[in-house]
């Protein structure tokens, strides 16, 4: 008997991620590619792939361009991900990531193409899908950018629909779409990075203390659970009055692309297990550590993730 999906991920602006490795990237010159891979992505689809790969039943939903949707369909079938997308005329965007192997983890150049344009009628069709799916899922993750044609209040609207039908919502977005959702219909959880939270609050956040204070302010706006990621410095996790700092252990970084999506996936997987905040933080950080050692939306095996979790240092923070 098929497992009942526990998590619904929403991706309104999917992307095909083309990653190519070069040795010593030179702008304005011929650069020869040593290896390449193409992965269907978009933040919510990445979250779904991470969860499905480690045993959580998941539904990926959203909008999907019809002209180049086959790689996404293949991923959903091979990974055992249920799919519920509204087809859109046009192509899903392509993101090219040039990895300069001579420059280390920071040597990634992104070239992002535009994708399809959506409209209110397409969003209405997707909302009808959400109304049907929300009651059968415990959590929904709203992740990533909005395609052209959709208003900044889109995530706020979707959050209201999902919560009205008994589904808790985690938001991982940025800019006006993030701000409007917090203003309109505060989600149950949010995972901004420290730069995104700085933009929302209108002041620079640098230190752990800044991230903690910013997270508390977001809680004051109605978001019960907040995770503020700070890259190699770790992440601050807040749930109600409790707060911890999780610092990752040492790993060999291949690419930081997808690390935030892996943290969201680990956060949801641990939350579904009912783990305490310290273990939620440890799991989410371990998954993020795993993501930076690979390319594309995939994680190492369970043994590696367990070793990662053992290397995470979790410290309580004062309320």
Image: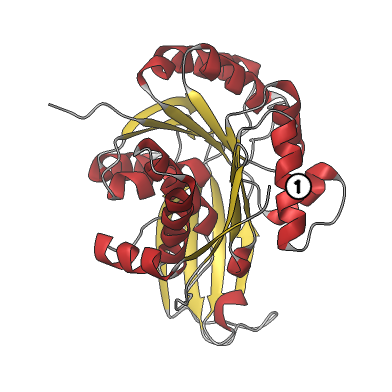
In terms of secondary structure, where does tag 1 sit? helix
Q: How is the image coloured?
A: secondary structure
Foreground: 46 or 274? Answer: 274
Q: Which residue is mark 1?
A: 214
* Residue located at (32% from left, 45% from top): 75
Q: Is 285 on the left or on the right of 115, as rendered? A: left
Q: Is residue 177 visible?
A: no
Q: Is residue 154 above or below residue 292?
A: above
Q: Is 211 on the left or on the right of 204, as rendered? A: left
Numbered-mark total: 1
Foreground: 36 or 76? Answer: 76
* Residue located at (48% from left, 12% from top): 165
Residue 94 spot, x, y in % from top left: 54, 51
Residue 36 spot, x, y in % from top left: 42, 70
Foreground: 315 or 176? Answer: 315
Q: Is 144 on the left or on the right of 202, as rendered? A: left
Foreground: 58 or 271? Answer: 271
Q: Is residue 133 above or below residue 171?
A: above
Residue 24 spot, x, y in % from top left: 58, 87
* Residue located at (43% from left, 41% from top): 268
């Amino acid at each position: 008997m098929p497992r009942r999906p526990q998590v619904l991920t929403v991706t309104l602006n999917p992307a095909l991620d083309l990653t190519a490795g070069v040795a010593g990237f030179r702008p304005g010159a011929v650069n020869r590619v040593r290896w390449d891979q193409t992965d269907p992505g978009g933040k919510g689809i990445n979250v779904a792939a991470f969860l499905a790969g480690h045993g959580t039943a998941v539904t990926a939903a959203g909008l999907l361009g019809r002209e180049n949707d086959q790689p996404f369909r293949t991923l959903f079938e091979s990974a055992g991900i249920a799919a519920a997308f509204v087809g859109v005329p046009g192509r899903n965007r392509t993101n090219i990531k040039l990895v300069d192997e001579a420059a280390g983890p920071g040597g990634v150049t992104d070239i992002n193409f535009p994708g399809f344009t959506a409209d209110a009628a397409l969003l209405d069709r997707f909302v009808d899908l959400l109304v049907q799916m929300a009651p059968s899922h415990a959590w929904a993750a709203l992740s990533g950018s909005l395609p052209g044609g959709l208003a900044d209040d889109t995530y706020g609207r979707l959050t209201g629909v999902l919560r009205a039908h008994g589904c808790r919502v985690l938001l991982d977005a940025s800019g006006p779409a993030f701000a409007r959702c917090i203003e309109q219909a505060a989600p149950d959880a949010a995972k901004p990075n420290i730069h995104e939270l700085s933009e929302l609050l209108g002041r620079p956040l640098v230190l752990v203390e800044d991230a903690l204070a910013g997270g508390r302010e977001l809680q004051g706006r109605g978001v019960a659970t907040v995770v503020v990621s700070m890259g190699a410095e770790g992440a601050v996790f807040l749930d109600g009055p409790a707060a911890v700092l999780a610092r990752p252990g040492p790993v060999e970084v291949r690419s930081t692309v997808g690390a935030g999506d892996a943290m969201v996936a680990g956060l949801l997987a641990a939350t579904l297990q009912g783990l305490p905040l310290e273990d939620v933080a440890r799991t989410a950080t371990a998954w993020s550590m795993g993501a930076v050692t690979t390319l594309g939306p995939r994680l190492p095996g369970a043994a590696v993730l367990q070793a990662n979790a053992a290397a995470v240092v979790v410290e309580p923070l004062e309320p």
